[in-house]
Amino acid sequence: MNIIKKYTFCFLYMILSLTIILLLLTTLYHFDIISSNIYHLLKLIMFLGILLLTGISLGKKATNRGYLEGIKLGTFTIVLFTLLTLLTSQDLKLKLLLYDLIILITSILGGMIGINKKKD
Protein backbone atom coordinates (compact mmCIF):
# COMPACT_ATOMS: atom_id res chain seq x y z
CA MET A 1 0.00 0.00 0.00
CA ASN A 2 2.92 2.32 0.72
CA ILE A 3 4.19 1.91 -2.84
CA ILE A 4 0.83 2.91 -4.33
CA LYS A 5 0.73 5.95 -2.05
CA LYS A 6 4.25 7.00 -3.12
CA TYR A 7 3.50 6.79 -6.84
CA THR A 8 0.06 8.36 -6.55
CA PHE A 9 1.44 11.38 -4.69
CA CYS A 10 4.25 11.90 -7.20
CA PHE A 11 1.97 11.52 -10.23
CA LEU A 12 -0.65 13.85 -8.78
CA TYR A 13 2.09 16.37 -8.00
CA MET A 14 3.31 16.14 -11.58
CA ILE A 15 -0.15 16.49 -13.14
CA LEU A 16 -1.20 19.34 -10.82
CA SER A 17 2.04 21.27 -11.37
CA LEU A 18 1.81 20.75 -15.10
CA THR A 19 -1.80 21.94 -15.18
CA ILE A 20 -1.07 25.11 -13.21
CA ILE A 21 1.98 26.01 -15.31
CA LEU A 22 0.16 25.33 -18.58
CA LEU A 23 -2.79 27.46 -17.48
CA LEU A 24 -0.42 30.31 -16.65
CA LEU A 25 1.49 30.01 -19.94
CA THR A 26 -1.72 29.74 -21.96
CA THR A 27 -3.11 32.84 -20.29
CA LEU A 28 0.07 34.77 -21.08
CA TYR A 29 -0.05 33.56 -24.68
CA HIS A 30 -3.76 34.37 -25.04
CA PHE A 31 -3.25 37.99 -24.01
CA ASP A 32 -0.23 38.33 -26.36
CA ILE A 33 2.24 38.83 -23.53
CA ILE A 34 4.49 36.09 -24.93
CA SER A 35 4.95 35.08 -28.57
CA SER A 36 4.13 31.72 -30.08
CA ASN A 37 7.77 30.58 -30.26
CA ILE A 38 8.45 31.50 -26.64
CA TYR A 39 5.18 29.84 -25.58
CA HIS A 40 6.14 26.51 -27.17
CA LEU A 41 9.69 26.67 -25.84
CA LEU A 42 8.55 27.50 -22.28
CA LYS A 43 5.93 24.78 -22.43
CA LEU A 44 8.59 22.18 -23.28
CA ILE A 45 11.10 23.47 -20.73
CA MET A 46 8.54 23.65 -17.92
CA PHE A 47 7.24 20.16 -18.66
CA LEU A 48 10.71 18.66 -18.70
CA GLY A 49 11.58 20.57 -15.50
CA ILE A 50 8.52 19.20 -13.71
CA LEU A 51 9.30 15.72 -14.98
CA LEU A 52 12.90 16.03 -13.77
CA LEU A 53 11.77 17.20 -10.31
CA THR A 54 9.26 14.37 -10.08
CA GLY A 55 11.98 11.91 -11.08
CA ILE A 56 14.26 13.33 -8.41
CA SER A 57 11.49 12.99 -5.84
CA LEU A 58 10.88 9.35 -6.79
CA GLY A 59 14.62 8.68 -6.84
CA LYS A 60 15.01 9.99 -3.31
CA LYS A 61 12.29 7.63 -2.11
CA ALA A 62 13.84 4.62 -3.86
CA THR A 63 16.04 2.18 -2.01
CA ASN A 64 18.28 1.46 -5.03
CA ARG A 65 18.34 1.75 -8.81
CA GLY A 66 16.93 5.23 -9.28
CA TYR A 67 16.98 4.81 -13.03
CA LEU A 68 14.21 2.20 -12.70
CA GLU A 69 12.05 4.75 -10.91
CA GLY A 70 12.73 7.13 -13.78
CA ILE A 71 11.79 4.48 -16.32
CA LYS A 72 8.52 3.83 -14.48
CA LEU A 73 7.72 7.55 -14.37
CA GLY A 74 8.65 8.08 -18.01
CA THR A 75 6.67 5.06 -19.18
CA PHE A 76 3.58 6.14 -17.24
CA THR A 77 3.84 9.66 -18.69
CA ILE A 78 4.36 8.39 -22.23
CA VAL A 79 1.38 6.02 -21.98
CA LEU A 80 -0.80 8.77 -20.55
CA PHE A 81 0.08 11.26 -23.30
CA THR A 82 -0.16 8.63 -26.04
CA LEU A 83 -3.67 7.75 -24.90
CA LEU A 84 -4.59 11.43 -24.85
CA THR A 85 -3.17 11.81 -28.35
CA LEU A 86 -5.16 8.86 -29.65
CA LEU A 87 -8.35 10.09 -27.94
CA THR A 88 -8.06 13.46 -29.70
CA SER A 89 -7.81 11.66 -33.08
CA GLN A 90 -4.32 12.92 -33.83
CA ASP A 91 -1.85 10.77 -35.70
CA LEU A 92 1.28 9.44 -34.08
CA LYS A 93 4.19 11.13 -35.83
CA LEU A 94 7.96 10.91 -35.64
CA LYS A 95 7.97 14.22 -33.76
CA LEU A 96 5.84 12.68 -30.99
CA LEU A 97 8.11 9.64 -30.78
CA LEU A 98 11.12 11.92 -30.38
CA TYR A 99 9.22 13.84 -27.71
CA ASP A 100 8.51 10.54 -25.92
CA LEU A 101 12.20 9.65 -26.01
CA ILE A 102 13.08 13.03 -24.47
CA ILE A 103 10.47 12.41 -21.75
CA LEU A 104 11.96 9.00 -20.96
CA ILE A 105 15.55 10.30 -20.84
CA THR A 106 14.57 13.23 -18.61
CA SER A 107 12.72 11.02 -16.14
CA ILE A 108 15.61 8.53 -16.02
CA LEU A 109 18.05 11.37 -15.30
CA GLY A 110 15.73 12.63 -12.56
CA GLY A 111 15.62 9.20 -10.93
CA MET A 112 19.40 8.88 -11.10
CA ILE A 113 19.93 12.35 -9.63
CA GLY A 114 17.41 11.61 -6.88
CA ILE A 115 19.06 8.38 -5.76
CA ASN A 116 22.46 10.13 -5.66
CA LYS A 117 21.08 13.09 -3.68
CA LYS A 118 19.66 10.66 -1.15
CA LYS A 119 23.14 9.54 -0.16
CA ASP A 120 24.27 13.09 0.68
Image (cartoon, rainbow, N blue to C red):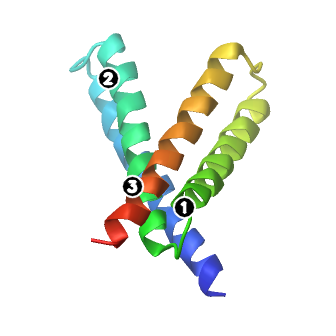
Q: Residue at x 50, y 65 (%)?
A: 10
Query: Which residue is label 2 attached to?
Result: 29
Of labels 1 and 2, the one closer to you: 1
Calculate the distance from the C-alpha at mark 3 to the C-alpha at mark 1: 18 Å
In the rendered structure, the answer to whether residue 46 lies left or right of residue 92 reads left
Q: Residue at x 48, y 41 (%)?
A: 106
Considering only order in the chain, which callout, 2 or 3, is on the residue closer to the N terminus? 2
Q: Which residue type does callout 2 highlight?
A: Tyr
Q: Residues within 10 Å of mark 3 (few under 14, many from 20)?
A: many
The image quarter in which residue 116 lies: bottom left
Q: Residue at x 33, y 33 (%)?
A: 25
Query: Which residue is label 1 attached to?
Result: 11
Where is residue 101 drawn, in percent x and y?
61, 31
Q: Residues within 10 Å of mark 2 (few under 14, many from 20)?
A: some
Q: Is residue 60 above or below residue 18?
A: below
Where is residue 119 drawn, in percent x and y?
34, 72
Query: Which residue is label 3 attached to?
Result: 113
Q: Is residue 114 above or below residue 24?
A: below
> Is mark 3 in CB contact (under 8 Å) with mark 1?
no
